[in-house]
Amino acid sequence: MRAKIRLQIVLAGTAMGAFVTNTVRAKAFYNFPTPVTPVAEDTLFIHDLFLAIITVLFIIALGVLLYSVVRHRRSRNPEPATFTGPRTRRQWMWSAVPVLVMIVIDYIVLGIPSVEAIMTLSNKGHDRLVVVATASQWKWHYAYPRYGIGFNSVLSTPRDEIYGNAPKDKHFLLEVNHPLVLPTGEKVGIVLKSTDVIHGFWVPAFGIKQDVIPGYLRKTWVKIDRPGTYRGQCSELCGVGHSFMPIVVVAKTPAAFHEWVVAEQAREAGARAAATQTWSRQRLMTRGKVVFDRNCAVCHQASGLGIPGTFPPIATGHPFSASKALLDKLSARGFYKDGRIVEGPLSNHIDIVLHGIPGTPMPAFGKQLNASDIASVITYERNAFGNRTGQVVQPSRIVAARRAKAN
Ligand code: HEC
Ligand SMILES: [Cu+2]
């Protein structure tokens, strides 16, 4: 009997020992990712401190419990105690001391670092750079007002991996066509906006998880220690594409960052220049497919068949079964009288892509895509998926449509 109990204690002790060494080593396994910002460092520090304290308390409490079970087991002391609460001074001590210990732990040992961490998080100091991150169903748009650049950042995981037809990459669903690029060692303010529903900006290595609320401006900040690629995800369930809007941040040294800014400005200037050229049909179609797959397929599907009830098909001959409210909005613009996108007038098509369809999930792409991309995607929609209008839209027409609406 005795030997058995002793064995149990030894086993429990070993398990606990393994647990403790594991938490100590956890850094290398399933702990937080290595922190790279002051906020993340504070968070990890508090987490480790808390874990160390509760591990010690847990061992003490479990030890006392096991000791009592063995020491006062029935076979040794069949008289049950009749304890009715603290009476003597000593009994009061036994009750008061743990309460005091908890107060010290909660309000001092953990309280002070916690308040400090919250103050770090709400640092109002000067930002060397401000970027605006705009969340929409289901992508991010990053703008750098100071440099006049901005771009969409959309999932780049191939569809075959998503649908299980190809082996999954190491960064499955955590890869984008165009990451957010930030300089290291500088305080960067990140202003967060949403164009539709609540999204969440979450990058674990930064220790940041900020809800993005439509109609409000939220702000957070980072000061990244070292160059690298940091991956995160939208952390608020925001619709069917919720898992398809990761956040990828590439941190570069300030010098490399400025090189990137210059290259990016040149790329955007190139795109603006391209918008003044006349594009061949082939060029529009090739670019249009890329733009469609990146920006439209999340809803209208790469097949162009849409999703009944929610997202209308683009492909010809597929009627859209949806609520009257949704259908009315389309028929008001000449779309979907009998399930053919090609019957929608071109000028309305342009208007829909530029300005979206208010009151529906169809987003306004006017500020997210450049004129060439919008011209390409409209040309593509009107000439792919069995749609044979033969119509070609030049970027200059989009530039003009934008201007007309702006006035
Ligand atoms: C977030 C989901 C979503 C995305 C992304 C999206 N759409 Fe739509 N789109 C919709 C919905 C919903 C409607 C239908 C609205 C209604 O019923 O009034 C629609 C309607 C349309 C229509 C008119 C109806 C039709 O199918 O003929 C066109 C054209 C269109 N979208 C083009 C685009 C293009 C081009 C893109 C990409 C640049 C795109 N959409 C991206 C949701 C989306
Ligand atoms: Cu989201």
Image: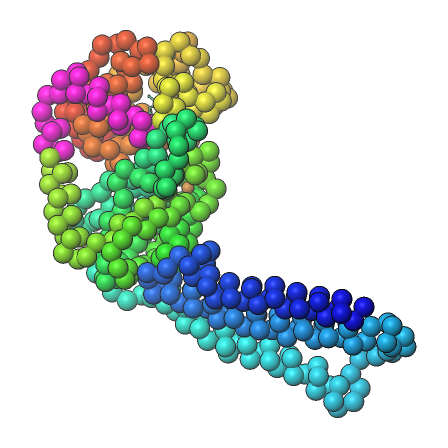
Q: How many numbered callouts?
A: 0
Is residue 215 visible from the viewing direction of this image?
A: no
Identify the residue shown where x is 26% and y is 50%.
Answer: 250
Is residue 318 visible from the viewing direction of this image?
A: yes
Q: What x and y, as percent, mark residue 3?
A: 76, 69
Name the outermost residue toward the bottom: 89
**Is residue 64 shown above or below 318?**
below
Identify the residue shown where x is 29% and y is 32%.
Answer: 365
Ligand 1: give its quadrant: top left
Answer with the quarter of the image where residue 83 lies: bottom right
Answer with the quarter of the image where residue 128 lies: bottom left
Query: Is 73 inside the magenta-drawn segment?
Result: no
Name the outermost residue toward the front: 3
| Residue 56 as seen in the image, left or right of residue 243 | right
Dominant secondary-structure state across the stretch colored magenta: helix
Residue nearest the viewer, comparing 181 with 28: 28
| Residue 354 as seen in the image, left or right of residue 18 | left
Q: What x and y, as percent, mark residue 47?
A: 47, 66
Query: Is 273 inside the magenta-drawn segment?
Result: yes
Answer with the quarter of the image where residue 206 lies: bottom left
What's the magenta region? 271-296
Q: Quadrant of the N terminus?
A: bottom right
Identify the residue shown where x is 69% and y is 69%.
Answer: 9
Q: What x and y, as percent, mark residue 124?
A: 31, 65
Identify the residue shown where x is 13% and y is 38%.
Answer: 267
Residue nearest the viewer, comparing 314 with 343: 314
Residue nearest the viewer, comparing 329 with 171: 171
